[in-house]
Image (spheres, rainbow, N blue to C red):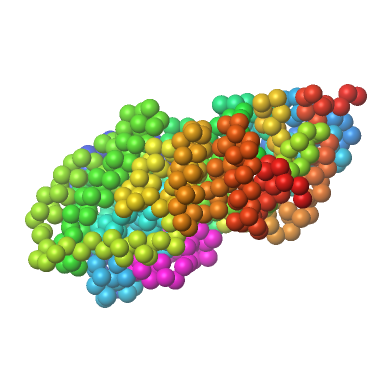
Amino acid sequence: MRKVAMLAAALALVAAPAGAYKLVAHGARVAVAKSEMTIDPPIDWNRQQSRPGRNAEAWTLDGIPLNEVTFYGGIEGGKALFKEVDRKNKPLPVFKSTMLTPDVVQLFEASYRIAGGSSLFEVGAVEPAEFAGHKGFRFRYTFTLEGEEVKRLGEGTGAVVGRKLWLITYEAPAIHYFDHNLADYRALVASARIPGPQVTVE
Amino acid sequence: MIRALGGALALLAAAPAPATDQVTPIGAGWQPTDKDERGLWLEVDELERKLRTSAFVMRDPALNAYVRGVFCRLVGEAACAPVRIYILRTPVFNAGMYPTGMMVINSGLLLRMRSEAQLAAILGHEYTHYTNRHVIQGFRDLKRKTSLMTWLALVPVGGYAVAAALTAAQLGMIASVFTFSRGMETEADAGSVPLMQKAGYDPAAAWRVWEQLRAEQDATAAARRRKSRKDADGGMFNTHPPTAERLAALKELAAKHPLAGPPDDGAARYAAALRPWWPALVDDQVKLNDFGATDFVLGKLAEDGWTPDLLYARGELYRSHGDLAQAAGFYRQATEAPGAPPEAWRGLGIVALRSGDEDGGRAALGTYLKLKPDAADRSMIAMMAGETN
């Protein structure tokens, strides 16, 4: 999740330190987000070393501000999606295992608004979608972060399985980048596997 | 960075209120005279240049004309003319007037005001900070109290920050740097009340604003099971802490400046001007995950009765808080009133499904889809409602 990192970078006037990313080579299945979710990337990606949250992990092709995929691996009830930015004054909302898709989308929106200071956040289409062999959902969103002014588009695909939230999101600037790498993101989503009654046995 | 800022502010807060430097009050056509002030103006001019094109600026001509009208009535046409007012879509209570004559007002402030007189109280307060040149005093004071290195860390000096076209966040940062001393807040309050009296606004609106904000801070703290910070500097209102002392002083000031005629609070005019924006601003507030403050603000907005929009918003708030039974009640009340937003049926359906009432949930979601056939979440909701495409 770029929000916190980018805001911090913008405020601290520092560039990302060397070694901030590690290569994720294609052709081998990898576990993501310190969870049982696995991905088989068709092309090479770069993993951001600093974790957006305990069960979250961000990948990019050209740098987090240009294209970012975030994996949320089995967020449990009572947990926020990512690290708190200011737990005391601006606590993040938490996932509840009884949430339905509209609740999850709303949770995601509120988390972004709070962490990124983005009052310009709009949810677009929300539709059913298969996720790792489970009944899930897909949603579109747009947002602009305070202090940055770049309009970004986003797509999220996920499911609530085993009382946990599994989600993969993709964000990129509306101009050029979003469309350019949307298929790369969808290929990652298509390769996702998570534990559950319908998991494919190799 | 945030830590460095906090440290510097703590330093400021710990110091006694500075004796006000003797500075000439500003007037129209004022130009900065020394290096400090010229530098500050350059920074603020640069901010304004970016702000002009910011996506966060609310450009609605009617809303802007209304707010400007209130300001001009308060300070007079001549003083008003050179001032540029920017309304930002930011759901936090704040406003600021910069030394160059740029004024910034957050939408979160507009949501909380109950009348034109309350808005005038804030505008008069900010205008007095401006005319008394509090920003440049605070700037010099900060420079005296912090080392050069800290100072450099506080002020955006170029590089990535400038390239990233910082606007709202940077404004917030500069506003935080220029946290006013208690003495300056007292001066600004003292300046606002005579302006209100002269313009015919009820001077009592000034203390009512702060009383309401203090109650809101209590509500936030109670819902988070924390001690209220209303008498401490900092927190949500960190540039204008509404302390008990200030409230008492404003009550005294109001008593000393009675109106000759009947007080005009312009509550109806204010409500009419803000009405087109309230659903959006309420939605911004609901999504802040501040249950106590939001429930309080909704209650204030509903003082003259719960409209279907407000009941829907309250349903959304309680649903996001996990209180499904209460949420269902508010959604139901909304749907029973004429003119309810279709989303109220959506909310009702979701909480019914989550509570195990499948038939009720599906029926409510079906009504939502009938009322809003072009809904962005149509296919998801249709599936939840058991409809086949």
Which residue lies at the image location 38% right of the left edge and 46% below the top edge?
Answer: B298
Residue B58 part of the magenta-drawn span: yes
The quarter of the displayed image where residue B100 is located: bottom left
From the viewer's side, name the closer residue of A13 and A134: A134
Query: Magenta region: which residues?
Result: B41-68
Q: In this view, does B165 lie to the left or right of A90?
A: right
Residue B177 in view of the camera: no
Q: Where is residue A195 in the image (x, y as percent from the top left)?
A: 77, 24
Residue at (50% x, 58% y) in the render? B56
| The one of B264 and B345 positioned closer to us in this rendering | B345
Q: In this view, does A97 lie above or below B334?
A: above
Give above or below for A36 relative to A173: above
Name the side, left or right, on which B97 lies relative to B1.
left
The C terminus of chain A, quarter of image: top right
Q: Residue at x 78, y 33 (%)?
A: A134
Q: Is residue A163 above or below residue A46?
A: above
Classify residue B313 as left or right of residue A165: left
Is residue A120 at all visible to an observer of this figure?
A: yes
Q: Residue at x 66, y 50 (%)?
A: B377
